[in-house]
Image: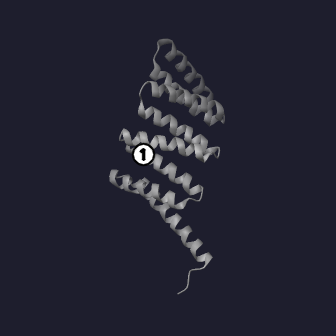
């Protein structure tokens, strides 16, 4: 129940502040962001994600920073703000590379390729999809590997249809 989760998370936030436990406060902010996003209170969710991001940076929690930025990017994408979504995702990508976190890196590659594909930037999408494909193979993630292959096939199919519809050049 979202209402109960909200009340508990607000209590956790308050308690963490009272005892000076910044990490607990950051976690509470993330939960509050999730809950508010679920409820459709997007602007409030962004406030909590940004507060969590600020604390993650203060605490030098690179994975926490990546998580908050990723959540913010998803909200921007859902609002149709691809520019800001990409900005956040590129920051996440850099962090994931620095901390060598393959799961975050894979997720971010997927998100970036999805944005480019939705913009009709198929060649840019393919760059990130092929990176995703190689990393998924390296870490043995067959599910992500399969998704990346399917999306690559979809893009190539779309390109072929466009090529045929325009009329193939004749010798």
Return the residue nearer the eye: 60 or 31: 60
Looking at the image, is 124 positioned above or below residue 157? above
Q: Residue at x 59, y 59 (%)?
A: 120
Looking at the image, is 42 positioned above or below residue 11? below
Q: Residue at x 54, y 38 (%)?
A: 71
Residue 34 visible (yes or no): yes
Can you give x and y, in whole percent of width and height, for residue 123 in the image? 51, 61
Q: Label 1: how many residues lie within 10 Å, few (<14), some (14-19) or many (20+)?
A: many
Q: Secondary structure at mark 1?
A: helix
Residue 1 visible (yes or no): no
In the orientation shown, which residue stands out farthest toward the top?
18
Return the residue nearer the eye: 95 or 44: 95
Can you give x and y, in whole percent of width and height, for residue 72 in the image? 56, 37
Image quadrant in which you'd find residue 158: bottom right
Can you give x and y, in whole percent of width and height, for residue 76 in the image? 60, 42
Return the residue nearer the eye: 143 or 4: 143
Q: Residue at x 54, y 61 (%)?
A: 122
Count of numbered labels shown in the rendering = 1
Can you give x and y, in whole percent of width and height, for residue 141 in the image? 38, 52
Q: Residue at x 48, y 51 (%)?
A: 110
Looking at the image, is 67 positioned above or below residue 10? below
In the orientation shown, which residue stands out farthest toward the bottom?
171
Horizontal side of 41 relative to 93 (left or right) equals right
Residue where numbered disc 1 is placed: 105
Image quadrant in which you'd find residue 116: bottom right
């Amino acid at each position: 129940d979202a209402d109960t989760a909200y009340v508990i998370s607000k209590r956790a936030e308050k308690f963490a502040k009272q005892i000076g436990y910044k990490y607990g406060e950051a976690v509470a902010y993330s939960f509050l962001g999730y809950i508010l996003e679920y409820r459709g209170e997007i602007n409030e969710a962004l406030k909590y994600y940004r507060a969590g991001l600020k604390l993650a940076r203060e605490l030098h929690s690179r994975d926490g920073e990546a998580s908050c930025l990723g959540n913010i990017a998803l909200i921007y994408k859902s609002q149709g703000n691809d520019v800001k979504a990409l900005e956040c995702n590129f920051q996440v990508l850099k962090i994931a590379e620095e901390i060598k976190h393959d799961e975050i890196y894979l997720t971010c590659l997927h998100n970036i390729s999805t944005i480019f594909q939705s913009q009709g930037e198929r060649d840019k999408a393919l760059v990130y999809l092929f990176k995703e494909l190689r990393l998924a193979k390296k870490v043995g993630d067959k599910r992500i590997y399969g998704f990346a292959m399917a999306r690559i096939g979809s893009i190539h199919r779309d390109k072929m249809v466009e090529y045929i519809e325009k009329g193939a050049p004749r010798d």
